[in-house]
């Protein structure tokens, strides 16, 4: 019964239990399992959440295939590299604006001078380190920090490409969209999580996050517009640094039908 408790079988693995729960609760729905095996043999996803790196759209009117949009880190990396080389001043302005969004004036910024009376001259280290920390926060490049973190993951692109191939083999029509976000940030500095997959879809409207990077934002918008959706945007540069965007931060309470 759909409402009855589901007990775990002793030999059942977590993924098997999850599959059985979903199939029991939603017997009329088609269940698609996605993911790939890591070198250690465990199943893994390309992104933190499935809706960070993939978005299901309506069927393609010509082929009848279901359409899914999969993140493509290489598209984001190439676009940023090209922008930095072609328009270094424009890139610098993007970085400054993003850094300000991530670290608005006064955000968690203690004044080192407030601490100075507690240290003698010989103990000035803590105050100097605080100054250095604040200076770093005010002058770092959040996109460079993000790109370095992604570059340190040798299989980052591979996981997204595997996901795209997996859905193609399952009969989906796959679109690729810029993506750049990772858990692999070793620095305490704030960085965005650039995902255009974490959207809210309401009929033919897509509420899509943007990040103040026009070339990336426009490329992502065109993917949804190509599929006949009206795109409504919201800047998520700051919020995304907390590992979420529009879909993660939204809960629909009521819809009017008809």
Image (tube, rainbow, N blue to C red):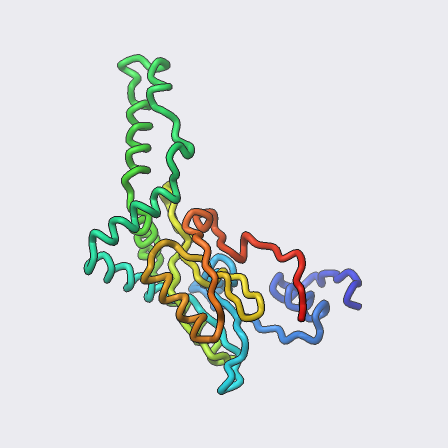
Quarter of the image with the N terminus in it: bottom right
Q: Give coordinates of residue 37: x percent, y percent.
A: 47, 67
Tell me, yes or no, if residue 226 can be seen here. Answer: yes
Does residue 94 lie above or below 118 as drawn? below
Tell me, yes or no, if residue 159 can be seen here. Answer: no
Q: Horizontal placement of 92 versus 190: left or right?
A: left
Q: Quadrant of residue 21?
A: bottom right
Does residue 66 lie above or below 107 as drawn? below
Q: Give coordinates of residue 185: x percent, y percent.
A: 38, 48
Q: Give coordinates of residue 41: x percent, y percent.
A: 48, 65
Number of marks drawn:
0
Residue ID at (43%, 53%)? 235
Residue ID at (70%, 61%)? 10
Instruction: Report the front residue among 119 and 255.
Output: 255
Q: Quadrant of residue 23?
A: bottom right
Instruction: Report the front residue among 12 and 246.
Output: 246
Q: Quadrant of residue 83?
A: bottom left
Residue ID at (43%, 59%)? 195
Q: Horizontal placement of 69 versus 255: left or right?
A: left
Q: Give coordinates of residue 157: x percent, y percent.
A: 36, 65
Q: Horizontal placement of 142 versus 239: left or right?
A: left
Residue sitting at the far front: 258
Residue ID at (54%, 54%)? 248
Q: Horizontal placement of 145 versus 19: left or right?
A: left
Quarter of the image with the C terminus in it: bottom right
């Amino acid at each position: 019964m759909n409402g009855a408790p589901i007990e775990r079988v002793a030999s059942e693995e977590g993924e098997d239990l999850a599959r059985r729960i979903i199939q029991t609760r939603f017997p009329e729905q088609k269940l698609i399992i996605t993911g790939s095996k890591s070198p250690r043999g465990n199943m893994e996803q390309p992104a933190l959440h499935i809706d960070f790196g993939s978005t299901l759209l309506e069927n393609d009117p010509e082929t009848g295939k279901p359409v899914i949009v999969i993140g493509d880190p290489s598209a984001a990396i190439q676009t940023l590299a090209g922008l930095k080389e072609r328009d270094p001043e424009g890139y610098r302005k993007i970085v400054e604006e993003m850094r300000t969004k991530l670290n608005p004036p006064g955000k968690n910024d203690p004044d080192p001078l407030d601490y100075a009376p507690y240290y003698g001259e010989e103990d000035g280290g803590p105050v100097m380190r605080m100054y250095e920390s604040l200076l770093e926060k005010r002058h770092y490049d959040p996109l460079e920090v993000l790109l370095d973190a992604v570059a340190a993951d040798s299989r980052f692109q591979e996981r997204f490409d595997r996901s795209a191939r997996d859905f193609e083999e399952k009969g989906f029509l796959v679109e690729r969209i810029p993506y750049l976000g990772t858990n692999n940030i070793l620095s305490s500095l704030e960085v965005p999580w650039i995902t255009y997959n974490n959207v809210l879809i309401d009929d033919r409207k897509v509420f899509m996050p943007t990040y103040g990077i026009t070339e990336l934002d426009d490329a992502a918008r065109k993917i949804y517009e190509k599929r006949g959706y009206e795109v409504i945007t919201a800047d998520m540069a700051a919020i995304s640094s907390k590992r979420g965007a529009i879909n993660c931060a939204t809960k629909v309470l009521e819809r009017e039908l008809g």
